[in-house]
Every structure is written in structure tokens, then in C-alpha cells.
Image (tube, rainbow, N blue to C red):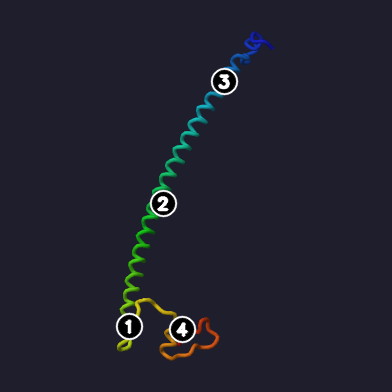
């Protein structure tokens, strides 16, 4: 059926159908571009949020690690003070910790059997 026959029968012409298809394709392309742009904006925003959260968490972990290091340093100082304070008269003690076996040897204690390195919590 040609365009003249289509007009006579009330059906759209090939040119009209072609124009409608073209208009639909253009609208679909515009919509796809808008969807892509919105998705990119959301992805960018999510990435910025994740980066900010990461920075905040790294800062908190760094602060916590710093506090722990300060506590360990303080405990080491206390332990050194205790070692020096518990030295026998005339004995000079190093501030460095010793292995439990060395301490037992100095105290004349024997290692309990079956314990790694001879150490036992009740000893």
C-alpha cells in the first residue's frame, strides 16, 4: 500500500510512522543520557562519602594507636621502675625484661613439668 492508499484508509503513512519511530528513538536516547548522568552523579557522590568515611576511620585508628603506644610506654616505664625497686641490695638491674627461666634461676625455683619453657601461671 502506498502513501496515498494509507491516507484513504485512515492508516498512518510510512513517512508518519518513520517520523514517530525517529521521535521515539530520540526520546529514548535522551532518557538514556539522563539516566547515565544521574547514575554517574550518584556514583561520584557515593565515592566521596566512602572516601570521607575512610579518612575519618583512619584518623580514629591512628588516634587509638597513639593512645595505645603511650600506654605501652608508660607500662614499660612502670615495669622498669619495679625491676629496679625490687633489686637486692647491691644488685644493679637492667631495665630490660628477662625471660621467666632466668628469673626462676635467680630465685632458685624449679620449672614445673609439662609446661612450655617451664612457665606455669600458678608458679
The Cα–Cα distance between marks 2 and 4, rounded to whole angstroms, is 46 Å
Would you name the residue on which mark 4 appears? Answer: 101
Would you name the residue on which mark 3 appears? Answer: 22
User: Viewer-nearest of labels 3 and 4?
Assistant: 4
- Residue 69 is marked as none
Could you tell me if the residues under marks 4 and 1 are in contact, i.e. CB atoms within 8 Å?
no
Q: Earlier in the sequence, mark 3 or mark 2?
A: 3
Residue at figure coordinates x 60%, y 14% from the top left: 15
The Cα–Cα distance between marks 2 and 1, rounded to whole angstroms, is 50 Å
Q: Residue furthest right?
A: 1
Q: Is residue 21 left or right of residue 81?
A: right
The Cα–Cα distance between marks 3 and 4, rounded to whole angstroms, is 90 Å
User: Viewer-nearest of labels 3 and 1?
Assistant: 1
Under tag 4, what secondary structure?
A: helix
The Cα–Cα distance between marks 4 and 1, rounded to whole angstroms, is 19 Å
- Residue 92 is marked as 1
Q: Earlier in the sequence, mark 4 or mark 1?
A: 1
- Residue 54 is marked as 2
Q: How many marks?
A: 4
Under tag 3, what secondary structure?
A: helix
Q: Earlier in the sequence, mark 2 or mark 1?
A: 2
Residue at figure coordinates x 39%, y 55% from the top left: 58
Residue at figure coordinates x 39%, y 77% from the top left: 97
> With respect to residue 105, does 67 lie above or below?
above
Judging depth in this view, the residue of 113 and 14 nearest the camera is: 113
Rendered location of residue 27, percent (x, y): 52, 25
The Cα–Cα distance between marks 3 and 2, rounded to whole angstroms, is 48 Å
Q: Earlier in the sequence, mark 3 or mark 4?
A: 3
Q: Residues within 10 Å of mark 4 (few under 14, many from 20)?
A: some
Amino acid at each position: 500500500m502506498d502513501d496515498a492508499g494509507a491516507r484513504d484508509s485512515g492508516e498512518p503513512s510510512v513517512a508518519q510512522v518513520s517520523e514517530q519511530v525517529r521521535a521515539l528513538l530520540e526520546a529514548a536516547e535522551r532518557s538514556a543520557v539522563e539516566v547515565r548522568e544521574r547514575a554517574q552523579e550518584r556514583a561520584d557522590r557515593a565515592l566521596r562519602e566512602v572516601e570521607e568515611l575512610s579518612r575519618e576511620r583512619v584518623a580514629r585508628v591512628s588516634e587509638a594507636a597513639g593512645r595505645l603506644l603511650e600506654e605501652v610506654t608508660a607500662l614499660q616505664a612502670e615495669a622498669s621502675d619495679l625491676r629496679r625497686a625490687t633489686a637486692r641490695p647491691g644488685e644493679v638491674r637492667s631495665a630490660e625484661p628477662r625471660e621467666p627461666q632466668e628469673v626462676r634461676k635467680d630465685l632458685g625455683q624449679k620449672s614445673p613439668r609439662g609446661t612450655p619453657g617451664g612457665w606455669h601461671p600458678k608458679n
